[in-house]
């Protein structure tokens, strides 16, 4: 390991420890904080209302987790999708039509089944669990979309939550949702697909908003603490970038 | 009620995650990290097989119910077994396998891509109705400018101003915006990873 790699490793450890420290600090000092203390994100407000309406009306919530898998950067958005699936499955556990999850990757499919089973077990409605509710809809980008569209169109879905790693093909899912008059809440870590979602989704989630899903759906104080830690570190990074730009401007770098 | 395995699951997941993370920074643990990642790849391959079995079962149920779209489930089953048979006999690079891929998969995906272009044009028009405002006009105006600057116009050819504007938007504005978004994505990913490592998020039956 050369000097530059060593410096990079040390900075990486410091960054993660700082992140961890801030999360623990905010968790310890802000246990009383609730979703009401956070800025409003209309997508989550509408989603909470829509899940409640779906339970009352006996319609289904469809959660699509993308094709990211758990190896590499897309894992982050996939894990957030699973957290949101957990919250939605708990909220809709008493519904006649429990939520259905589609994914484009084997590991995500297995985990989506596991998350739903755990959610139902935790609210003592394990009989609601159906292994067919967590599905692999296809393995290539377009076959995944082609497999998920019939779920939106034919399975009495009223709300679509698209959270995970998608490409621009996600536009076909939002269009199917639009045809049925469903609510679409959608977010991804893929920048070109975010541009598609701004145009095509009713409630797009941009950038870090995707990762706030757990906090806004009541996943606990630690999610709110991690959101506050992200806010602090974002400002730290902004200051570092501005200092770097200034140093470059005056010839220090 | 928690599953009796939830604690064991959590211990395995958290300890594995910590070893892999620390292995990135501490060379001493690099070999263990590599080994764990190889195991993860093998498990992912098995999960893929489970996923394919799930896909076939879901479509088998659909066929059994003789509901709308049941015929497509039959098509999926037939196509699946023909493809598996051909690739098993001919090999993944054999001429028949390549023929199947080039004659069916690529045209179908190309068709969906073309459909996507139309869908996005309609979505942009719908956006004007749904969220008419300054940012919507800027978004659509920019998209039009980039489109016009990318391809030569029929009967006119390339307009230098549009090409230069497109290059500036693509090279400066969109890169700056994309980096800002990626910064947020990176912070969110780290936060999610730490929550999983601490056992706050347990997407594995915890």
Image (tube, rainbow, N blue to C red):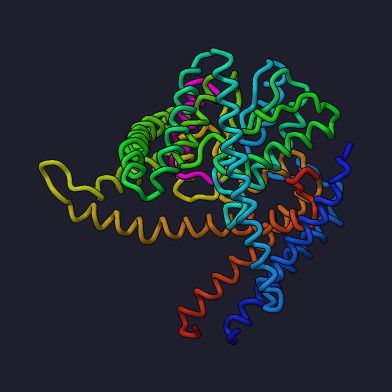
Tell me which segment is drawn in magenta.
A165-182
Q: Position of residue A153 (x, y in %)?
A: 52, 21
Q: Position of residue A24 (x, y in %)?
A: 82, 60
Decide if residue B165 is on the left or right side of residue A192: left
Quarter of the picture containing the C terminus of chain B is: top right
Quarter of the picture containing the N terminus of chain B is: top right
In this view, A40 is above or below B188: above
Residue with the most extreme front position: B89
Residue nearest the observer in this picture, A69 or B164 = A69
Q: Residue at x 69, y 39 (%)?
A: A84
> Which quarter of the figure has residue B47?
top right
Decide if residue A172 is on the left or right side of residue A51: left
Q: Position of residue A216 (x, y in %)?
A: 71, 41
Residue with the most extreme left position: B155
Q: Residue at x 35, y 38 (%)?
A: B100
In this view, B166 is above or below A174: below
Decide if residue B6 is on the left or right side of residue A169: right
Q: Residue at x 18, y 48 (%)?
A: B152
Residue nearest the observer in this picture, B82 or A224 = B82
> Which quarter of the figure has residue A37?
top right
In this view, B161 is above or below A186: below
Using the rendered image of the protein, determine whether residue B6 is visible from the camera's viewpoint. Answer: yes
Is residue A42 in the magenta section?
A: no
Residue nearest the observer in this picture, B48 or A114 = B48
- Please count the marks in the image: 0
Using the rendered image of the protein, determine whether residue B121 is visible from the camera's viewpoint. Answer: no
In this view, B64 is above or below A130: above
Q: Position of residue A151 (x, y in %)?
A: 55, 25
């Amino acid at each position: 390991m050369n000097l530059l790699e060593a410096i990079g490793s040390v900075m990486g450890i410091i960054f993660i420890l700082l992140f961890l420290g801030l999360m623990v600090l905010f968790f310890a000092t802000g246990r009383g904080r609730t979703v009401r203390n956070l800025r409003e994100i209309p997508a989550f407000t509408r989603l909470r209302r829509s899940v409640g309406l779906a339970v009352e009306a006996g319609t289904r919530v469809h959660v699509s987790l993308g094709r990211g898998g758990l190896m590499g950067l897309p894992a982050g958005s996939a894990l957030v999708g699973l957290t949101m699936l957990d919250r939605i499955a708990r909220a809709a556990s008493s519904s006649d039509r429990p939520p259905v999850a589609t994914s484009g990757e084997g590991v995500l499919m297995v985990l989506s089944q596991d998350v739903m089973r755990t959610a139902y077990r935790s609210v003592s409605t394990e009989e609601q669990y159906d292994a067919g509710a967590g599905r692999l809809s296809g393995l290539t980008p377009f076959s995944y979309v082609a497999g998920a569209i019939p779920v939106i169109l034919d399975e009495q879905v009223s709300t679509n939550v698209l959270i995970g790693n998608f490409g621009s093909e996600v536009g076909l899912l939002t269009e199917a949702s639009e045809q049925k008059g469903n609510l679409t809440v959608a977010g991804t870590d893929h920048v070109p697909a975010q541009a598609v979602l701004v145009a095509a989704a009713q409630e797009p989630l941009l950038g870090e908003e995707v990762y706030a899903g757990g906090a806004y759906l009541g996943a606990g104080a630690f999610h709110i603490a991690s959101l506050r830690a992200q806010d602090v570190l974002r400002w730290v990074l902004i200051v570092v970038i501005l200092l770097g730009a200034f140093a470059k401007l005056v010839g220090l770098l | 009620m928690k599953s009796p395995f939830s604690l064991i699951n959590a211990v395995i997941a958290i300890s594995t995650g910590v070893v892999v993370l620390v292995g990135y920074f501490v060379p001493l643990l690099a070999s263990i990290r590599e080994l764990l990642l190889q195991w993860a790849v093998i498990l992912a391959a098995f999960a893929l097989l489970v996923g394919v079995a799930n896909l076939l079962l879901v479509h088998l149920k659909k066929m059994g119910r003789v509901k709308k779209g049941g015929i497509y489930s039959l098509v999926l089953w037939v196509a699946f077994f023909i493809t598996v048979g051909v690739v098993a006999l001919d090999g993944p690079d054999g001429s028949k396998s390549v023929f199947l891929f080039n004659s069916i998969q690529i045209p179908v995906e190309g068709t969906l891509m073309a459909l996507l272009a139309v869908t996005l044009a309609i979505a942009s028009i719908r956006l004007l109705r749904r969220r008419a405002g300054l940012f919507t006009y800027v978004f659509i105006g920019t998209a039009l400018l980039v489109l016009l600057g990318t391809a030569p116009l029929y009967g006119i050819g390339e307009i230098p101003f549009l090409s230069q504007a497109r290059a500036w938007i693509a090279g400066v504005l969109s890169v700056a915006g994309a980096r800002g978004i990626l910064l947020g994505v990176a912070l969110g990913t780290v936060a999610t990873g730490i929550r999983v490592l601490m056992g706050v998020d347990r997407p594995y039956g915890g």
